Image (cartoon, rainbow, N blue to C red):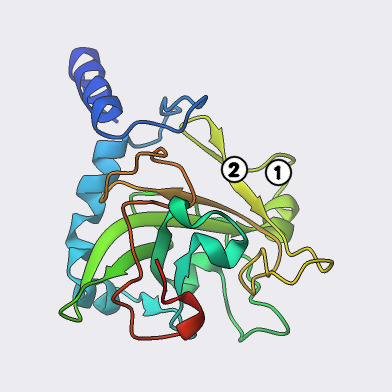
Amino acid sequence: MHMKNTVMITATVAAFAIFPAQAGETATPAPGEPTLQEVREATLRFADVNVALAEGYIRDPGDHCEVATMMGRPEAEGAMGIHYFRPDLLGISAPPNPRVDGNGTHTDFRQPAVLLYEPQEDGSLALIGVENLVFKAAWEAAGNTEPPRFHGVPYDRMEDDPSTALDEAHNFAPHYDRHVWVHRDNPNGVFAPFNPMATCAHHQGHADHASN
């Protein structure tokens, strides 16, 4: 962010052209926030999943490949993929009891807490997006009264509704999260939760999420 104004304006305009926000949303970096292009460049090394593993990311222990239908959303919305996460950045210190919980408040997308991968037909993984997640109780305990934001867009609030058969919070305690699709175009917007250009068709893990 320490660039001359003319360079920053050019980079910002280019980033908007490459990574459109969701309809009705702006995508203007707040002071100190990286541009979408900077997030992409900072996380390109994770295209090699072995680099992510070496830096402390672990694969979702349930080996889920998340698709829109598991959240009761239209199949056309697509998929999220397989999540690899850094327990230290999420502040996770214990297994689910009964849900995954943590005390992290990390929101820097240059070092995201979660990486999103799409299974390929040959068994490899393609990096498609990044995510940050903060637990609601920890965020509020830190003195925050509103959800975190990125580029002016509030994170999504995720909390299970016990009256439904779905688990809206993915076995996590109430939290806020934001997906950013900087490694795969998303016609629904760079901040949409799912991506119709992503698929779990080649996933060989959890059967409930191996469609799309």
Quarter in which the C terminus is drawn:
bottom left
Badge 2 element? loop
Position of residue 166 relative to residue 192, above or below, is below
| Residue at left offset 43%, top offset 62% | 113
Discs 2, 1 touching: Cβ within 8 Å: yes
Query: Where does the image place residue 67, in percent across and percent down from the top left?
Result: 47, 65
Query: Which label lies toward us, 2 or 1?
Result: 2
Give 33 or 180, whichever is nearer the viewer: 180
- Which residue is the site of mark 2? 148
| Residue at left offset 67%, top offset 53% | 139
| Residue at left offset 72%, top offset 60% | 159
Query: Where does the image place residue 127, in percent across and percent down from the top left?
Result: 25, 62
Name the amino acid, label 1. Asn
Badge 1 element? loop
Give 187 or 149, whichever is nearer the viewer: 187
Position of residue 193 relative to residue 61, above or below, is above
Position of residue 148 relative to residue 170, above or below, is above
Quarter occupied by residue 120: bottom left
In the visual, does 183 lie left or right of 161? left
Name the amino acid, label 2. Pro
Numbered mark located on residue 95 in the image? none
Quarter occupied by residue 65: bottom left
Query: Where does the image place residue 11, in percent across and percent down from the top left?
Result: 21, 25
- Which residue is the site of mark 1? 144
In the visual, does 198 lie left or right of 209? left
Give 31 or 209, whichever is nearer the viewer: 209
Query: Where does the image place residue 185, in percent across and percent down from the top left?
Result: 28, 44
Q: Residues within 10 Å of mark 1 (few under 14, many from 20)?
A: few
Q: Residues within 10 Å of mark 2 (few under 14, many from 20)?
A: many
Quarter in which the N terminus is drawn:
top left
